[in-house]
Amino acid sequence: MTSEEILKNAEAWLADFFDTDTRNKVQELINNDPEELKERFYRNLEFGTGGMRGTMGVGTNRINKYTLGKNTQGLSNYIKKSFPDKKHKVVIAYDCRHNSDTLAKVVADVFSANGIEVFLFSGLRPTPELSFAVKYLECQCGIVLTASHNPPEYNGYKVYWQDGGQIVPPQDHEIINEIECLSFEDINFKAIENNIQYIDKDVDEAFINASVENGSFNAQEKDNFSIVFTALHGTSITVLPEVLKRAGYKNVHLVEEQAVPNGDFSTVKSPNPEEPEALAMALKKAAEVNADMVIGTDPDSDRLGIAVRDNEGKMVLLNGNQTMILMTRFLLDKWKKENRINGNQYIASTIVSTPMMKVLARNYQVEYKEALTGFKWIAKMIKDFPMQEFIGGGEESFGYMVGDFVRDKDAVTSSLLACEIAADAKAKGSSFYNDLLKCYEDFGLYREKLISLTKQGISGANEIKQMMVDLRENPIKEIGGSKVQFLEDYQSSMRTNLLTGDKDTLAIPSSNVLIYYTEDGTKIAARPSGTEPKIKFYFSVQGTLDHAKNYDKEIAKLDEKIDRIIKELALN
């Protein structure tokens, strides 16, 4: 977009339709800060893997009442076209972030002004509860105002459809087309308050009961199992303590300093349970109370981080792949013991997650389904294969879903499941950690690592684009001393055998992802983020574990191999 076009976009925001404060801020940018003006108006925010997400402020490339209002107006039009003969209903939730409550009310106002009945949570709530509420309240659509674990200046807008899952193609493109047909002046902000109903305890009760029902597996000796829980200033504090209590866990210790919702996330650098630092206060408390497990959830309560004691009694943080593997094996064992596996079941994960999920599926004789990054694709599987039974599934980014009563990653029910696994293991003289090592003994030792490279602004976006072009046009031939055998390009939907030249078509929808596979089982994926200015590289290597006592030695070898590959690719 040229400088003239950017200026024209900005000057449109000086019209009387926009409020005085917005007009003053835009004029100030025009007068004094052309670079910041460019960043705010050079494009429109778009839907990515997690919906629409960005920094807050004035401009078409920012989250504000006008960009969200325009999206909501377009979505209102789309709902009416999609369901012409039904009463139109939506449900809206929001998290702890700055302006989430006021932006949620703006969204509710626009829906209501368009004659749509709105159920608006009266306070902050977890994202999985929003997914649940869409089906529970028989709505056509759900919205949650959240930016997950992003920094405090971010907010976002995630759209769910009537099945409780996030929107997927072609719906997202159809909605975007509807939005792009509108000007900002087409937004109807004049709320019809009678169309807005505030909800809280009734839906909470239904969600809590469903979480306990789906996440409980009759673990023994819960009174002797000690848990430290941190909400990281987010929404899980509204329901998770009650879920654990009703499931029979009495020995739960809250990190009180992080139990208060706070959009500044004042006690952490990043409210992301993927980051070890985020759980530092919880680990300190675990040492004080001699806890068996630490649980931490991100601000909108869809991601789960846990720490457990190793065989030396030291608390260790597990990654998303490790947690996913043990949760899935536990569920598969339960289904197998109950004779519920008959060839009609499946587990699911994503193309950048551990290959060990496929190994589990093969050993338990269930189908393995693989999807693009983002839980909306796993939710879509449930909708696309209604005659099959979904057992559970996850992704490497600390997300897991137990059954299908929620159609998104769900840290609430998954936290309970983690406690059930650990308490059950403790009652049998084992531990969560030991059970994980047993998985590695039985199915192979896998090690994964993620590197995220942040590239801000227009120049950063161009740099990320060029990195992907280079990886496509000049494929890597050898990684870590092993020849690259396959290159999967999800943008062209093509899998190429680089040793023979043979090509196959990939059945998964198109996406800007590249995955390299070597002859020795090493896997490297490159993926630009759909919601953040980052490019992510996912590494997976494999070996064997003959005995748990050799775990540290064998895992060190795999870590060293990953580090060598990262250095070889000049990504450090």
Image (cartoon, rainbow, N blue to C red):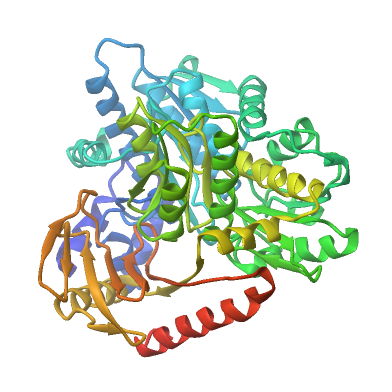
At a point 54% along the width and 83% down the height, the residue shown is 557
If the image is split into quadrants, where does the C terminus sit?
bottom left
At a point 24% along the width and 51% down the height, the residue shown is 12
Q: Is residue 474 left or right of residue 341?
A: left
Q: Is residue 243 above or below residue 310?
A: above
Q: Nearer the viewer, residue 195 or 447?
A: 447
Q: Nearer the viewer, residue 449 or 180?
A: 449
Q: Is residue 63 among the parts visible in the rendering?
A: yes
- Residue 184 in the image: x percent, y percent? 27, 41
If the image is split into quadrants, where does the N terminus sit?
bottom left
At a point 58% along the width and 64% down the height, the residue shown is 441
Q: Nearer the viewer, residue 278 or 27?
A: 278
Q: Is residue 64 among the parts visible in the rendering?
A: no
- Residue 395 in the image: x percent, y percent? 46, 53
Q: Is residue 246 left or right of residue 184?
A: right
At a point 25% along the width and 33% down the height, the residue shown is 186
